[in-house]
Image: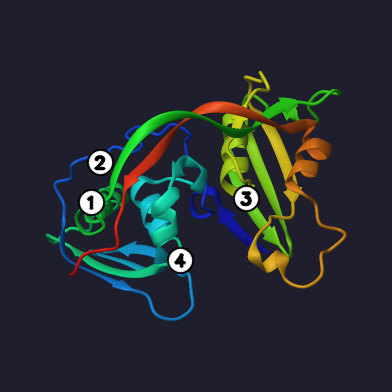
Amino acid sequence: MNLLTFGSALLILALSSLGLGQTVPSDRKFEVASVKLHEGPGRIGITASGLRLNAEAEGVWGLIMYAYNLKSYQFSLTGPQRATLGDMFYDVTAKADGDTPPTADEFRRMMQSLLADRFHLKVHREQREVPVYELVVGNKGPKFKASAHDATSANRLRADGRNWEAILSKASMDDLVHLLDGNGFLDRPVLDKTGLTGTYDIKLTYTPDIPPNRRGEPDPNDISIFGAVQDQLGLKLQPQKAAMELLIVDHVEKPTGN
């Protein structure tokens, strides 16, 4: 068994983050930064540790999502920008100035500045109607119980083979939405429409739609996130549309020289 905390399991991204699409000036900057076209297979991702940030085989959309702390449904890279840059991957190596390691937010703001400088990225914020899932109570009501008054708040995600088991103690519906939005691997954001305002003890077992689970033949015992929410929790993920603030990419180019 492998225990993952919510903080290390790619959790929790607010739907309307402060500063979405707005480059926030940072006192920190990259002292040196190299941006090169990636050669070979991959998408490997972005890491930031100490004074250094490394992105290997990362697409422009991935760099933007990192810089603004977004999910794919929270920004729009379409039209000529997508056609020009959609199949291109880059290696970025950068070192921050100073002697103190930047915070995660500082690294993100520094990446915003790098994108504006090297990729000539221009963005703005805009409210648009987008597909969402509304989390609602099913016909027979919720199947979980309210937490005891002296219960301790704790959230865990346990991976066991193909399945993940989420255990939420003294959790609000916001906590459940954050789980579904962050670890449900859904194609759209989740909005709480349950009307439940208390704290609850929740257990949810499901088979996440991740690459290891897509290999080979489908397993008939897999538990979809939609079925798990309905059968185990007495709730439903209901497709709807809602207005949401998006980051709109107005302009982006192939990167300039180092």
Query: Which residue is at 14% across, 46% downward?
Result: 27
The mark nearer the N terminus, 1 or 4, is 4
Determine the CA span between mark 3 and mark 2.
Answer: 28 Å
Check disc 2 and report the residue beneath it. 23
* Residue at the outermost bottom position: 40
Determine the CA span between mark 3 and mark 1.
Answer: 30 Å
Check disc 1 and report the residue beneath it. 116
Name the one closer to the observer, 35 or 97.
35
Determine the CA span between mark 3 and mark 4.
Answer: 23 Å
Examine the image and state in which quarter residue 101 appears. bottom left
Give coordinates of residue 121: x percent, y percent: 27, 50
Name the one closer to the observer, 124 or 7.
124
Q: Quadrant of the N terminus?
A: bottom right
Check disc 4 and report the residue beneath it. 87
Check disc 3 and report the residue beneath it. 185
| Amino acid type at image mark 3 | Phe
| Amino acid type at image mark 2 | Thr
Crowding at mark 2 (Cα within 10 Å: few <14, some 14-19, many 20+): some
Along the horizontal axis of the image, is 81 left or right of 164? Answer: left
| Amino acid type at image mark 4 | Asp
Res. 228 visible in picture: yes
The mark nearer the N terminus, 3 or 1, is 1
Q: Is there CB contact under 8 Å for labels 2 and 1?
A: yes
Examine the image and state in which quarter residue 123 appears. top left
Along the horizontal axis of the image, is 196 left or right of 15? Answer: right
